[in-house]
Amino acid sequence: MNLFHEVENKYYELLTRLLISNIEFLDSAIAECWDKYIIGERDFEVEESLFLKSQEQGTIFEFDGKKFLPTMEAPFNIRMTTIELQAAKNLLMSKYAKHFLKDETLTKLKDILKDIAEEWVISDIVVRNQYSEGVTYFEEGYEVQLSIIAEAIRQRRPIIYDNAVEGRYRFVNKELFPVRIEYSFLNDAFRVCGYDKKQNRFIKLNLSSMGSITMGNNEQEDFEEEYKEFLKENSRTIVLDVEPTEHVIERCFRIFSFYDRKAIFSKEDNKYRLEISYLKFDENEVIRDVLSLGSSVVVVEPKRIQKQVYKRSVEALNRYIV
């Protein structure tokens, strides 16, 4: 068994996460990680061989009588498939690449990928069911805006912007310390996450409603740790079972493209288990999206969303009963 090959060994993710953490951990942490990252039942023989408790030093972890400690150094090299390498080469030609990657990084990637055959290009891909007036439609306007926001994130400086939606609201000369840029494939739209000092909270804005974006002068402390804490306190998770029908799973990934997600396919059950992380402020939107998928999707957890989906489904059904 090749321990450090992500294709050949199902324990790869478990081992790399524990090694990269480079911290001491108890048996309980191993059990928790095992349940989270390993598919199927626990193999105690493998577990005992990986986490030796004898006085001899283990190959990967050593045990001091109470805790385990990694004995190997991380990180590990990333191995990409041929398709991933070809996709990376295509993405380097994107006009947006220079806004998110430094020139030296782009140069390194171009050198690494120079011998990769271009068997296909992004323009060959036909995108269906995507909002027709998104980034693609207004790409000339977004190019400069993204560059300013990305540079503000790098320099830990604020952006000054106007924010308006015709007929609803208009704000002028607002200040925001951007920390993250998100993209939704379905909506073909960018969102900017940042800290608003006047409101003393993190907010999200649609780039399409922002204008007159410039970079401010006053440098601020790094908000990255605060944003991580904000995400930790306000993040929620929903777990779905999805039928393996092609158009259904495709819609799932498109609908939830704004959120972090993880999918595992079970051959035994013949279905996808989709785990989606979102902010609690987006919960009503997530529930509406789940309902739009109909009977092809089942909410596994949490129970409170199960109840809401059931209640709304019954209410919708009752409207059609004479």
Image (cartoon, grey):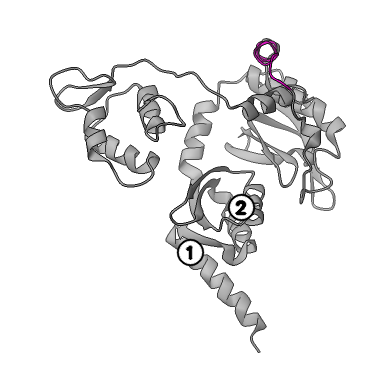
Residue behind mark 1? 306
Instruction: Choose mark 2 or mark 1, whichever is in front.
Output: 2
- Quadrant including the C terminus: bottom right
Residue at image location 45% in from the left, 59% down from the top: 300
Alpha-carbon span between mark 2 and mark 1: 20 Å
Q: Is residue 261 left or right of residue 158?
A: left
**Image x and y of residue 91, in percent:** 72, 26
Nearest the camera: 138 or 81? Answer: 81
**319 vs 217: above or below:** below
Residue behind mark 2? 249
Tell me the SS state at disc 1.
helix
Q: How many marks?
A: 2
Chain part drawn in magenta:
105-117
Q: Which amino acid, mark 2?
A: Ile
Residue 215 visible, this angle: no
**Image x and y of residue 162, in percent:** 79, 36
Residue at image location 52% in from the left, 66% down from the top: 308
- Quadrant including the N terminus: top left
